[in-house]
Image: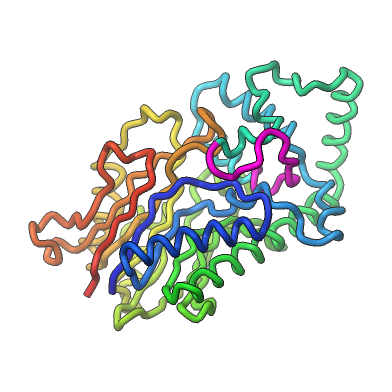
Amino acid sequence: MRVAVLQIRPRLCWSRTEFESEIDSIVGSVVAEHDPDLVVFPECMGLWLMGMEATTLWRRIWSWFLPGHSIEAQRVQACITKEWDEAEYYEMAVNLQFSRPPKRTVAASSSGGLLSQISEYSMLSVSASGTGRSRFAETFRRGAEWLMNRLPFRFLAKRLRSKDELEAYQDGFSAAARKHEVYVQAGSLFVMEERGVKNQAYVYGPNGELITVQEKIHPIPFEIMLGILPGSGLSTFEIAGVTCGVAICYDVNFPNDHVQRLADAGCRFLCCPSGGIVPTHLWKWDFEKDIKEATWIRSQESDVWIGRSYNAGDLIEHVLMFQGIASITAPTNDTDDGSGIVGIVPEDHLVKEHTLVCDVT
């Protein structure tokens, strides 16, 4: 089984069609270059859809109850002026996915710029309230925001927004898998349910069928504070005689836990879609902490291969940044040099797109 593990730049897609086109292009180019059986995307794929226009009139009406990007821009600016706090930045990522679809007022292309294409974020260098509004308009907006936070409409609007994004995500990855006749582990996205939000990863087969949904078992502490619920369950799938599973990001940090249960279920290869938010692109990844004490040690304990995918680049320039150190680890006996490292993104590609490929037997 050949696997392609992606380290990839987030795209801001303004429509369902544009999202489907981006996923199709990425999967198509990876298949053409590497001919994999399985393609693995990173975590937080919902951020690609935060700019997507609502797909029905009903959902467009309800989207007005969602938080606007003026509010998010002010939260972003507050983060900039304070010491780096990982929790705040991941909260920002969740809020962006469930905000009101923005108007594209700065640029018309999804390539480059990303959130700087939205006027509220292009004005971050101005004062926190400097969005061109009068004092009366700003006071009115704050009052409306306060009121919306205390009415049930916002929760219902977020449920509809989540459903819109999930449908686009599912259709986009299903179509790409079917067109290019390849298995696709579609990273993960936040999905709002009745009891709260879960981080879920989906896998599609060469016929476009959904074959696996895996929830994130261990939300990190700040995710729990945001209302993201611990996941449950265990699901596997088979490709060319190799049993595979999914462990989302932090789930690989626990010994004798989810990874071991997947191994006990017969898994030989695990997809590990991960985020990669960093405070600055000067951030230095720690091999011992970020690889050896996570995926590498799990590979040795549980006798499994693990392909860890990451985002790379900026979603909000100089503010919401991703830095990948995608890797593939394996039991030491399965590597020629006995290192247990099959592949790792070179240091000069930490903020660039990169694809790691391995053959698992």
Residue 71 % position (x, y)? 73, 32
Q: Quadrant of residue 322?
A: top left
Q: Say which residue appears at 31% left-offset and 40% top-offset.
A: 349
The quadrant of the picture occupied by the N terminus is bottom left
Residue 151 % position (x, y)? 86, 47
Q: Quadrant of residue 32?
A: bottom left
Relative to 329, residue 176 above or below: below
Relative to 290, residue 130 above or below: above
Is residue 120 something one can see in this rendering? yes
Residue 87 % position (x, y)? 53, 37
Residue 226 % position (x, y)? 62, 45
Colour setup of the view:
rainbow
Q: Nearer the viewer, residue 113 or 69?
A: 113
Image side of residue 111 versus residue 41, left or right: right
Image side of residue 44 versus residue 273, left or right: right
Q: Nearer the viewer, residue 165 or 252?
A: 165
Q: Say which residue appears at 35% left-offset and 55% top-offset.
A: 308
The quadrant of the picture occupied by the C terminus is bottom left
* Bounds of the magenta segment: 95-112
Q: Say which residue appears at 38% left-offset and 55% top-offset.
A: 6
Image side of residue 134 versus residue 317, left or right: right
- The answer to whether residue 118 is magenta is no
Image side of residue 181 versus residue 78, left or right: left
Q: Say which residue appears at 38% left-offset and 41% top-offset.
A: 352
